Amino acid sequence: MAHILIVEDEADLRDMLSESLEQAGHDTLTAGTIGEARLKLEDSSPDLLLLDWMLPDASGLQWLRQIRRIKKFLDLPVIMLTARGEVSDRVAGLDSGADDYLIKPFSLKELQARIRTQLRKHNGGLQPERIELGGLALETDTQRVLAGTHEIRLGPTEFRLLKHFMGHPERVFTRGQLLDDVWGHQVFIEERTVDVHIRRLRKALEPSGRAGLVQTVRGAGYRFSTRKS
Ligand code: CA
């Protein structure tokens, strides 16, 4: 199951795509214009983008170039939907950062296959991941963190922060690095925001006696370590 953002201005095609992808077990969001798509992309962080080429307010291709300049969307799988006869444009599409393209009309079966391929390619988008370290188990598909059988409730930012730490144990991160890696391209966030979320994360880990895993490294930043600091 993946979260898929469908950007298509032909309402019938958009509804049909949404319906069939939902039937295949995905969650879909739809947009009919680039303006709408821009908001939904920011808000929902989809796993894959289906992007029509010609849209009423802008070209899907131009928007794709903009998206690819944003760090957190560098790896977002994008499949372009293009009209027949735009053969030379196919090359332009791939140059602009599309991972694949489909020429209209295409079969739903073909679309499903291309989606599966992209999700597999992009760090196993559908593969459940489980990281076990320091007595904690973090599951990315269910977004749960367990200490033994006890579930630790975390907000989405604390979850991402912990996932990042557990994926890079013992490594020291500066606040700036954590902002880049965990928050992505959000220029209005100050470095002390990191401290706020570190505190929340420690507080959530406290009852299970695991707060000491998130360590302050003086003059440098933070690390996740199973050794005593
Ligand atoms: Ca169109």
Image (cartoon, grey):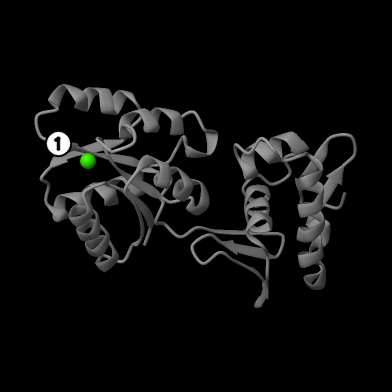
Residue at the far front in the pictured view: 57
Figure quarter occupied by ligand 1: top left
Q: Amino acid at mark 1?
A: Ala
Task: Please tell me how many numbered marks the rendered image carries.
Answer: 1
Callout 1 crowding tier (Cα within 10 Å): few <14, some 14–19, many ≥20: some
Question: Ligand 1 within 8 A of label 1's CB?
Answer: yes
| Identity of the residue drawn at 16% across and 21% down | 88
Question: Quick check: can you spot residue 167?
Answer: yes
Q: Position of residue 42 (x, y in %)?
A: 51, 46
Question: Residue 166: where, in percent of width, then height?
Answer: 65, 52
Please give left or right for residue 82 compared with residue 31 in the image.
Answer: left
Residue 148 shows in this picture: no
Element at label 1: strand
Which residue occupies the foreground of this view, 131 or 13? 13
Residue under pointer 1: 83
User: Which residue appears at 14% of the width and 28% of the height?
Assistant: 86
Q: Is residue 38 left or right of residue 20?
A: right
Q: Quadrant of residue 66?
A: top left
